[in-house]
Image (cartoon, rainbow, N blue to C red):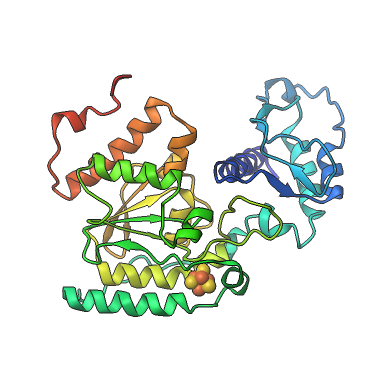
């Protein structure tokens, strides 16, 4: 593994752990053998490359060898100097030691999502009564769906979506969390309230847009007492036809993809770095898609610049929809008083 690959892998791992933490995950199951591999001392080297290699940030090292090891309680810390190659080797050793029962949470089998044909044209649009009937039919099928047996067994609700079936704007998230599962509606927790604020700041309401997730059932968390987990690629690809159908019914003028996982699920991509793609228009079956940060990212990163980035994405969406934009709206989050 090259140094670059290693850094990419480490970045992805840190992002994954931070995402789990933001979703409320406090513990990750981890095998004792994995802990041993991760904690193994690394041989020192006098190779001059080591002094020029920036010390990367790494996820917290678990403190115990309990099967339920605290993995997200400490912010990322600076690793002691090591060669990336050595750390990659250590990571590979650890990865190889993971048992199948651990893999679902800690690995991202990126190749499992089939490629989505994002250029397939949409069918002719339905009239309003046809949209209502089609969405009702979809809802009935989704409520009875058991394609993902563990999720169907664990769920309280199938969270199909909410809003206007003729909306011009569709927000797409990744999956219901604990609160969404309990209430049967997407984006009703803290992140949901943040999304509602964003929608209202755009001069819209939840009733005039449509909100849906790639996955309609909450990802099960059999090894956790509470918290949520990121959907697996195969779960998203299994459920994606429902979202595809919703998009065909609604035929929104713009889609906002909330976070990297929503982008991965929607486009069938293995790995999306939201920091790289946010703000750049994409196209899904002819519909412009604006990728932006997930509201939970704003909640855990309260910096003005992140709020402004999301707001600039929304301003671009408003312009695309020819929505009126006041001077006050244009100036949101440009200064500490914004
Ligand atoms: S996540 Fe989607 S495909 Fe899987 S059981 Fe639920 S509705 Fe069915």
Of residues 222 and 255, the one nearer the viewer is 222
Question: Which quadrant, please, contains the C terminus?
Answer: top left
Q: Position of residue 143 (x, y in %)?
A: 45, 75
Between 17 and 49, the residue placed more toward the observer is: 17
Q: Quadrant of residue 333?
A: top left
Q: Position of residue 14 (x, y in %)?
A: 62, 39
Q: Can residue 143 be seen in the rendering of this structure?
A: yes
Determine the residue positioned at 48% across, 79% down: 144
**Residue at screen point 37% across, 26% down:** 304
Image x and y of residue 179, in percent: 49, 54
Q: Is residue 314 left or right of residue 214?
A: left
* Quadrant of the rendered image containing residue 185: bottom left
x then y, percent, for residue 218: 53, 61
Say if 336 sits above or below 24 in the image: above
| Picture residue at 82% right of the left edge, 51% below the top | 31
Residue 238 visible in the current orientation? no
In front: 132, or 305? 132
Residue drawn where x is 32% and y is 77% of the image: 136
319 horizontally vs 288: left or right: left
- Specify the quadrant of the image occupied by residue 213: bottom left
| For residue 259, above or below residue 115 | above
Q: Nearer the viewer, residue 267 or 337?
A: 337
Assign the N terminus to one quadrant of the image.
top right
Please, is residue 282 above or below residue 310 in the view? below
Is residue 73 toward the left or the right of residue 280 in the image? Answer: right
């Amino acid at each position: 593994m090259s140094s670059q690959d290693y850094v990419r892998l480490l970045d992805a791992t840190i992002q994954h752990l931070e995402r789990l933490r933001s979703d409320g995950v406090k513990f990750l199951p981890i095998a004792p053998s994995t802990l041993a591999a991760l904690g193994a001392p690394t041989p020192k080297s006098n190779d001059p490359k080591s002094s020029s290699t920036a010390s990367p940030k790494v996820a917290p090292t678990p403190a115990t060898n309990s099967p339920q090891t605290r993995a997200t309680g400490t912010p990322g810390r600076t690793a002691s100097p090591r060669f990336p190659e050595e750390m990659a080797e250590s990571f590979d050793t650890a990865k190889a030691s993971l048992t199948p029962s651990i893999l679902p949470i800690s690995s991202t089998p990126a190749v499992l999502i089939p490629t989505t044909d994002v250029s397939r044209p949409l069918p002719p649009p339905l009239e309003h009564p046809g949209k209502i009937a089609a969405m009702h039919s979809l809802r009935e099928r989704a409520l009875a769906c058991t394609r993902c047996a563990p999720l169907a067994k664990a769920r309280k609700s199938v969270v199909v979506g909410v809003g206007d079936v003729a909306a011009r704007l569709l927000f797409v998230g990744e999956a219901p969390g604990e609160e969404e599962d309990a209430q049967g509606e997407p984006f009703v927790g803290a992140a949901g309230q943040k999304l509602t604020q964003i929608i209202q700041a755009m001069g819209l309401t939840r009733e005039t847009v449509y909100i849906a997730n790639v996955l309609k059932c909450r990802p099960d968390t059999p090894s956790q007492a509470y918290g949520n987990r990121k959907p697996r690629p195969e779960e998203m690809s299994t459920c994606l036809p429902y979202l595809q159908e919703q998009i065909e019914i609604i035929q929104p003028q713009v889609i906002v993809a909330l976070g990297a996982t929503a982008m991965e699920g929607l486009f069938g991509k293995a790995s999306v770095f939201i920091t790289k793609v946010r703000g750049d228009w994409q196209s899904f079956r002819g519909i412009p898609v604006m990728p932006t940060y997930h509201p939970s990212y704003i909640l855990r990163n309260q910096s003005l610049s992140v709020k402004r980035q999301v707001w600039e994405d929304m301003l671009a969406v408003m312009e695309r929809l020819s929505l009126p934009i006041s001077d006050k709206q244009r100036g949101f989050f440009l200064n500490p008083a914004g």
